[in-house]
Amino acid sequence: FSHFYFTSPRHLVPGHGMPGDISIYSLGEGELNYVAPGSILSLYRAKVSSDGNVLVFRSNHETYTRLTADEQADECKGFVVDTTAPDCRALFRYEDSTNSLECLSCLPGGVTTNSVGETNAAAALSEDGETVAFVTPERLLPEDINNAEDVYEWRNGALQLITDGETAYTSTGIGTTPRVYGMDPSGENIFFTVVQPGLTGYEQDRVANLYDARIGGGFPRPTET
């Protein structure tokens, strides 16, 4: 109970936020910090590290102010009232000890045009807050060429693909796109489902399978004969 994260319409930290607008705040070690603009749903299914220092959360439809300086497509910057407009919610990591906020699902040095994951499976977080797994169709790395959702890992500031970034998924059917289900406390095991025959070379039934991407584990893909 060293840290407490909450939203409030009150202007609690001078110089941050707008009076009457909802903001996210942290209360840690007796100090109140402003985190970001938000909504009443900003902390829905948010993740917190075991020491309370790291918060991982998604921006919401109601968040009409950009949370960081990362560029987003023009259609993503306004208050979403058109149900046909793109869902451009992003995943953010806040570190209370440095009062810093980083967009994990934003395209580095580019313009973000896609939303991160599903509401019920936005991200998984390790106990120390240094590893985050999430799903996004955004091409965050050059080897991601399928223009479809993939599982990414953010670990100590470095991004890498967990899925292959090549397999194209169908848009219909249950469990056809990747989904993160959890992570062990150390962050060395990431559990996810995906329909991806080329991931290990054994899955050919076009049905989603459960995988464990683990550091120091795994096995080589079988060679074609």
Image (tube, rainbow, N blue to C red):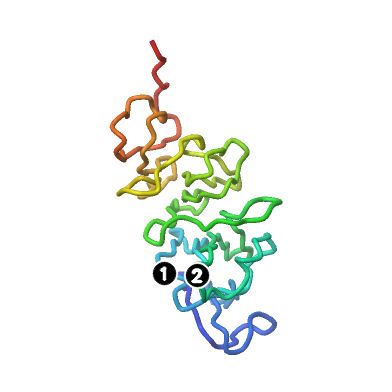
Q: Is residue 163 above or below residue 35?
A: above
Q: Residue at x 60, y 87 (%)?
A: 11
Location of residue 215 in the rendering, given as x and y in whole percent from the top left corner? 45, 34
Q: Residue furthest front?
A: 84
Give the residue pinned by disc 2. Answer: 60
The amino acid type of the residue labelled 1 equals Tyr
Q: Residue at x 40, y 62 (%)?
A: 119
Secondary structure of the residue carrying numbered label 1: loop
Q: Along the horizontal axis of the image, is 194 left or right of 114?
A: left
Q: Is residue 38 above or below residue 89?
A: below
Q: Picture quarter containing residue 21?
A: bottom right
Mark 2: few/some/many CA within 10 Å (<14, 14-19, 20+): many
Q: Residue at x 51, y 83 (%)?
A: 8
The answer to the question of whether label 1 and label 2 lie on touching residues, with beta carbons closer than 8 A, is yes
Q: Earlier in the sequence, mark 1 or mark 2?
A: 1
The amino acid type of the residue labelled 2 equals Asn
Location of residue 15 in the rendering, given as x and y in whole percent from the top left corner? 70, 82
Q: Residue at x 48, y 53 (%)?
A: 128
Q: Picture quarter containing residue 221?
A: top left
Secondary structure of the residue carrying numbered label 2: loop
Q: Quadrant of the N terminus?
A: bottom left
Q: Which mark is residue 44?
A: 1
